[in-house]
Image: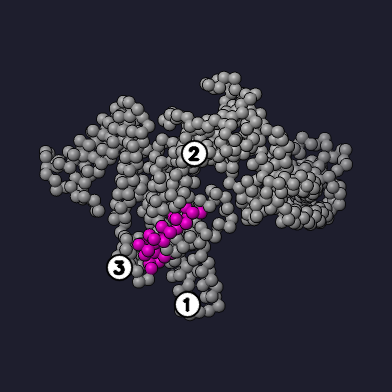
Amino acid sequence: MLKPKQMSRLLIAASRDQMVPVIAELYRHNLFHIEEFVDAGAEGYEGFKIGTPLPGASEKSADLIKIRAIANAISVRGDDIEAAKPSSRAESRKRIEQELPVLEREVEDLTARRSKLDTQVKEYEQKISEITPFINVPADLDLYHGYKRFIVFAGFVSREVTLTVPSEMYFSKGKEKNFLVAIVPAEQRTEVEKALQEAAFQSVPLPDESGAPQGRIDYYAGQISALNQEIAEINQKLGEVRKSHADFLVACEEFLKAEVEQTEAPLRFATTKQTFVAEGWVPSENVATVTQALEKAAGGKIFVTELSVDYEHENVPVEYNNPSFATPTQVLMDVYSRPRYTEIDPTLMVSIVFPIFFGLILGDVGYGLILLAMAFGLRKFLKGEEGRQMLAVLRNASISSIFFGILFSEFLGFPIPGWSPVFYSRHLMAAENGGHGPNIPELMVLSIWIGILHITLGRVLGMVNHARQDHGGHRIKAVLANFGWLTVMWGLIIAIWSVASVPLMPNLTGLPVIVAGLNLGIFTGAVLIVAGVVFIARDSFLEVVEIPTIVSHVLSYARLVAVGLSSVAIAMVVNFMSITMFITPQLKNLTIVGIFIIIAGIGVFIIGHALNTALGILGGGLHSIRLHYVEFFTKFYKGGGKKYVPFGMNRRFTED
C-alpha cells in the first residue's frame, strides 16, 4: 500500500507477419506500457529502425478526425452518454462506411450556415455600437459625410469645449463621458484639433449610414433578432442530430481511436524487414497472463522474456497500489507529483490525514451535511475520472466535518441542543457554551502536537527513503541528516518543556538542576540540538541556515485551529444578524413590515451560511492540503514519477 505496483520489463520479439495479432492482443489486455524505441544509438538494436504504421492508418485517422469534429460541433462527450449495448467491430465499421459521410455533410452544412449567421450578427452589433453615440444628436447620419470644405469631428471629451472658429457643434453631457460633434472649416483643422486635445478628445468612427440613428439601430436590432431566430432553428436541428446520433458517435469514436492506436503502434517499435521488437512494462502479477496470451495469439511464433531491471536508475512507470478508500486521494497526489517507483507512496497517509485536518477546520454538522449533499449532487455534472475522484475526496472530507461537528457540538454556528462538546469547545460566546468560554489554548496546543507528530513522521519516512534510494557514504549522511532534523526539533521541544509549563504537554520544569539554574531537560535538549546540527552540516552545511524553519513549520499547524475559529466566528455573526437583529424582534409584534424584515433575515441567514460554506471548502481544503505539500512532503517526498499508461483502453461502447 505504501509502494507502487511492482513492475516487470518485458521484451517481445516476433516476425512482422505476427505484428497485427500481437498488437491486438496487447491492446485487448490493456496492461503493456510501451517504451518508445529511439532510433539514435540504441544499444543492442543496431540495424533496427522505427516501424511504420499498419495499412489503413491514414484513412482511419481521417475518419477519427471527422467523428471528433462532428462530436465537437454538436457537443457530444463520451462521459455524458450512458453506455448501452456495446457495438460489435463489424457493426461499427459498417455504420462508419454508410452513415458517416451523410452525417458529416449534414452537420457541416448546418454549422457552416450557423457560422455565417453568427458573423452577420456580429457585423450588425458592431454597426449598432458605432451608431449608438450619435443617438441623441438631432441630425441624420448622412449629414456627417460628403463635405469637401468642411471636416466633421465626433468623439468623447472630458469637458465642454468652446471653439473660436466658425462651427456647427452639438455637445451632450453624460454620466461618465461627454459626447461632441463639430463641423468646422477644413482650413481651421489644426486649431480645432488643439482645442479638442486639451479636452482629452477620443474620436469615434463616423457611421457610413443614412437616416435617423434610432431608426438604423431599430433596423439592425430587427435583423439581429431574425438572424438569432434562424440560429436557434439550426441549433434545434443540431440538437436533434445529437439526440439521434450521440450513441453512434461515441461508439465510433471509441472504435476508431482503438483502431488508430493499434495501426500506429509500430511507430513505437524497433523493426527490421523481417522482425519487430517491443519493450515495455507490465505489472509483475500479470506477466504470466500477458505472456501466455501473446504466445496463443502468435501460435507460438513469438519470443517473450522478462528483462533484468535496475530499479534504482531506470525510469519505471508508476501505478498506484492503494485500497479502494484511498484511491480518490490519488488526484491530490497527481496535482503535486506522482511518486517515484523506489520511494514511499504517501497516498494512503494523505487519504487518512487530509479529511481529519479538514474536519478540524470545518467541524460543523450543518456545513458537513451541505458538503455531503454537494458531493452526491454534483455526480451528474462531473462524470470524468478526476471529477469523480474530487467528489469522493469532498465526500470523505464532509463526513469528517460531521464527525468533528458532533465532537465540537456545532450546527451552522449553533451548539447542538442537549449535546455538550465531547471535544474542546470552539463557541466564542460563553452564553452559548453553558457559561464556559472556548478552549482556545488547549486547541492551539493540540494543533502544535499534530504538527510535531506529522513532521516527525515525515522525517522518519525521509530516513527510510534515503536508506532505500541512496548508496555508500551519501546514504549514511542523508539518513543521519534527517535524524539530525528530528533531534534538533525534539531538542527544542524538550528545552521548552524544561523552561515553561505548557498545557497538555509534559512538564519537565521539576527535573534536577545541573548548573546555573539549568536543569537536566535543558542540557538534554541542548545535546540533541548540537548533535542534530552536526548531522545536518555533515550532509550539507548550507542546510544549517534552514534550521529556524523547524519552528515555523510546527507553528504552521496552528492554522487548523485559527481557520476553524474564523469559520465559527463568521457563522455566529450571521446567526446574530439574521436571527437576533432581524427575525426575533419582529416575532414579538408581527406586522406587514415585520414580515418583510423576517424575509430579509432569512435571506441574510441563507446567503451568509452559503458564503461561509464556500469559504469553508476553500479554507479547509487549501490549508489541509498545504500542510501536506509544504510541511509534510518536503521532509521525505521527491515525486517526479512517470505515469503508467498501458497500451489499450477500457471500452464502454464497443466490443473488443
Mark 2 element type: helix
Foreground tag (3 vs 2): 2
User: Which amino acid type corresponds to the residue marked 1 in the rendered image?
Assistant: Leu
Mark 1 element type: helix
User: Which amino acid type corresponds to the residue marked 2 in the rendered image?
Assistant: Ala
Foreground tag (3 vs 1): 3
Seen from the viewer's position, the closer of residues 314 and 425 is: 314
Identify the mark nearer the N-term, 3 or 2.
2
On residue 288, which mark appears?
2
Residue furthest to the front in view is 299
For the record, the magenta segment spans 391-416
Q: Residues within 10 Å of mark 3 (few under 14, many from 20)?
A: few
Quadrant hosting residue 626:
top left
Residue 43 visible in the current orientation: yes
Tag 3 residue:
435
The location of residue 451, given as percent across then percent down, is 33, 47
Question: What's the CA distance linking mark 3 and mark 1?
Answer: 27 Å
